[in-house]
Image: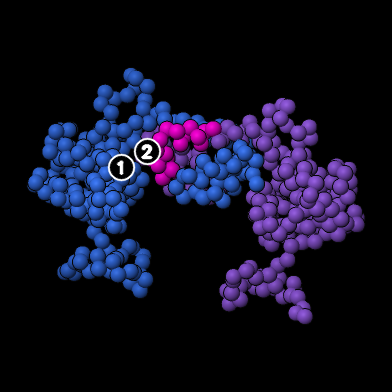
Chain colours: A blue, B purple
Amino acid sequence: MYPKPIQDFIDNFAKLPGIGPRQAARLAFWLLNDKKNTRENLKRALEGLDKEVKTCKFCHFAIENLPAGRQAPESKCPFCDNPARDRKTICVVEKETDLATIEKSGVYKGLYHVLGGLFSALDIAIPKNLKIPELVERISGRTGKEKIEEVILAISPTHEGDLTARYLERLLKPLKIKTTRIGRGLPYGSEVEFADAKTLSGALESRKEIK
Amino acid sequence: MYPKPIQDFIDNFAKLPGIGPRQAARLAFWLLNDKKNTRENLKRALEGLDKEVKTCKFCHFAIENLPAGRQAPESKCPFCDNPARDRKTICVVEKETDLATIEKSGVYKGLYHVLGGLFSALDIAIPKNLKIPELVERISGRTGKEKIEEVILAISPTHEGDLTARYLERLLKPLKIKTTRIGRGLPYGSEVEFADAKTLSGALESRKEIK
């Protein structure tokens, strides 16, 4: 149906999360009819991911890979590098975009730890790529100088999130560090009428006394 | 919030149709955590749009830009090049993906003409980039050898689509060629209860006698 370069484009872009073959086709023709510059910028942006990004060695958030000399000696992200933040609390998140949402909300001022994924509901093995050993090292004081006093699991209340949180809770117990998980309940602006049973049960469990 | 190369990626990808900054951020980290190969493939796919695509000089659909020698002497798409198709009918579409939808449905076997856009509801000027002069040339027999007998306007029933179709109807009238527009009505599988007034009025106008 489509000429080969267009079909190649569709096949490749349709593999990305949230983009189906229809949107990929629309993108292909939109880009074809747009300035060459737009396509150049996208190529450069993809290159930037390879060449200009590395990982904070403490929290594993992404940081810019600056040329030698301009980079701080330790590869630290702006959060880990900021002495004004609460350095006694670590907020554990699944992924970088979760960190961004929490940070933008302005309700949290401590440190972060990006796990890089969750346990799978289909595979009982402990995923090897998650930054769990690194989290344990940080909490037990082997990386960084801070003495951690609380670990907040800001992990989504999904089946995979629950599996991950339960594993982390058990793992951290011997370290005798306060471990909490963000509360469940009805989101702001939602209506009880449309809440599902799991949300309602979470909301009842985390009910608070009105004084 | 995000390091510069990630923010650059987000800014560039969020300009694409149907992709917002949130999805662009998710894409950035998904790609970062995926194989380098995926990013290479996307870059190559973008390059392919520049180097390997050209336009059929008859219907303006995209065709592969083959190396010299392998290319047919006239830059013809598979539809314009196929003698088995009905060469007396031209189906005028707004864009390449509309052509693809019609072609995949299998209900049409004639030729196509890709306009490359529609009239704007906000600007009364006739858009210069539309392949309207090329359509007139084709119909009046100056390009190609076929004698066109019907022009089907397969243009979406939107305000912009109506403006475009009305202009084309007036323009083609002096050429004395049968011009039709695809019918309006309720889409297959939809319910009368939820149809809006414009759809219902179109459906009533295009009602057919049951014999």
Seen as rendered, the residue at the extreme top is A69
Q: Amino acid at mark 1?
A: Gly
**Badge number at residue B108:** none
Seen as rendered, the residue at the extreme bottom is B211
CB contact under 8 Å: marks 2 and 1: yes
- Residue under circle 1? A116
Q: Quadrant of the N terminus of chain B?
A: top left
Left or right: A107 in relation to B45: left
Mark 1 Cα shell of 10 Å, populated few (<14), some (14-19), many (≥20): some
Which structural element holds mark 1?
loop
Q: Numbered disc 2: what chain?
A: B
Magenta-span inclusion, residue A78: no
- Residue under circle 2? B33
As displayed, is residue B169 above or below residue A32? below
Mark 2 Cα shell of 10 Å, populated few (<14), some (14-19), many (≥20): few
As displayed, is residue B112 above or below residue A75? below
Q: Quadrant of the C terminus of chain B?
A: bottom right
Seen as rendered, the residue at the extreme front is B84
